[in-house]
Amino acid sequence: MVLSRRIARDLKENMMRSIAMLLIIAMSMAFVGALCSAADSITEAVRAEWKKCLVEDGSFETYTPLSKRNMNELSKVSATVERMFYTDIPLSGGATLRIFKNRTKINLAYIEEGRLPKDGEIFIEKNFAKSHGLKVGSKVESGQTELTVSGVGCLPDYGYVKQSTSDVSANDEFSVAIVADGDFKRLRAGRKTVFCYAYRLGSASEKELKDALLELDIDKTMISDTYIKAQAEKPGLMKERIFGITGAIKGGAMEISEAARQAKSDSLGSAASGIYAAADTLENEISEAISETPETVNISSFGEAKYNIRITNAIDDSKIGKQAALVVGAFLLILLVYMLAVFASGTIEKERPVIGTLYALGYKKSELLSHYMKIPLLISAIGGISGLALGYALTGKMAASYSAMYSFPPLTRVFPMYLNLYSTLMPTAFSYIINRAVLSKKLAGTPLSMMQDDRNKAKAVKLRLAHFSFSAKYKIRQFFRELSGNITLFFGINISLIIIMF
């Protein structure tokens, strides 16, 4: 057919423009694909680590360590609780390591190289090891203690390695590590130890575990902090002071009762008995109230894992980029596909006499519309598919910034179906819808009007501008003559600004 032969000629005549549009669409889809693929790969890697390493459901800290009796009482709740005590030690190079004893039930270390430490050894977080040139067999020093690196990897409860959750960002001179029990006892000597506990819920709820913690008795002999010790002893001291006052009242009542007996005054004796009974009742009420008050002073913090940025931030942060990429990609596609429609529309404008002749020869509007839509659809489809392939190829590069900030295992590459459909079908679908709407209107003329090319008359806008100067009249009329181009420019600028904001 004549129209089929024209496709190759049109592509050849507008080769540079077609290649440019194809590359722009491909780059746009590569941007979307790389960000989304990186986010999904990070999510898959982190969730696999959580499952393998038995990440905590939450954690809590206490002012004093829980006693064996406390741990036995917690074991009655359907939840697993494990000590995660830690202390921060300085290294000879100026960095700080937060050391833990090896975990056995919760938050197990993810080992990428080497093994867990024995006496005289240390397991180092991967990003710290990389930035400080450490590997298996390297030596680290803290004071007079020298430790050999036995392994490198990451800890699921420190995916975002921050010294404090309130810190703005991670610090390259701070990280986490695991040492053997004996080394932990030796290194923590003389330093502040944080009594942290991690838990994994069985059939118990968060509330049941909290209630069990609130009911634990405090071993006051283990409290070293003077303020906390004063707070823990405050109810007992208050009870003693009140009992001293009520005891004095009761003693006075007894003296009054004796005086009333000697004076043979029944009314005074009755009053003294009432005062004594009231003081005795007050003692009993206060004693019962103090004994029923839960000793909550030992729990300094309690938090669920889903609110812990050290655990969840790698996934949450990557999801933000993914969501922004999907939205920006849609805006970009609309803009780019509309540009293709404008180019095709310009071709129709130039070929109106030819189109009118084809109409006169018996060609239908649907056949001509299909012809002029083929090139934009072809460019959109090839651009989307090549962009998706390029996006998958760039996943590692796009995830590199996250890998440098967060500590998680090597990426698990995924190829999500939604992304495949987004990158391949959306450009073609948008191209079909927009080009059909724009080009259908351009091909709506009669054969005679097309051949005579009377589009300027049809587009003439009659305006009464008698009170304006010639210059103003010319500018206003020119604006309305080019109204479609001005509207395109307006929306193009707005979409570009939205993309910049994203």
Image (cartoon, rainbow, N blue to C red):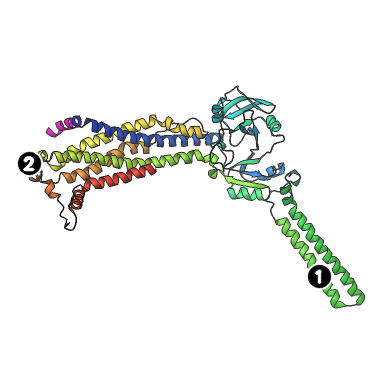
- Residue 1 visible? The answer is no
Find the distance from the CA under tag 2 to the CA under tag 1: 119 Å
Q: Which residues are magenta?
A: 1-10
How crowded is the residue under tag 1: few (<14 C-alpha within 10 Å), some, or many (20+)?
Answer: some
Q: Quadrant of the N terminus?
A: top left
User: Circle 2 sits on which residue?
Assistant: 360
The reply to whether discs 2 and 1 touch (Cβ–Cβ < 8 Å) is: no
Residue at 32% in and 46% down? 494
Specify whether 445 is left or right of 287.
left
Amino acid type, label 2: Ala
Residue at 27% in and 40% down? 337
Specify whether 268 is left or right of 116.
right
User: Which one is in front, 166 or 105?
Assistant: 166
User: Circle 1 sits on which residue?
Assistant: 275
**Mainly helix, strand or loop, the magenta region?**
helix
Secondary structure of the residue carrying tag 1 is helix
Secondary structure of the residue carrying tag 2 is helix
Q: State yes or no: residue 4 in magenta.
A: yes
Answer with mark 2 or mark 1, whichever residue precedes in sequence. Answer: 1
Q: Which mark is residue 242?
A: none
Please state the horizontal and vertical placement of residue 137, each as a whole percent of the image: 60, 21
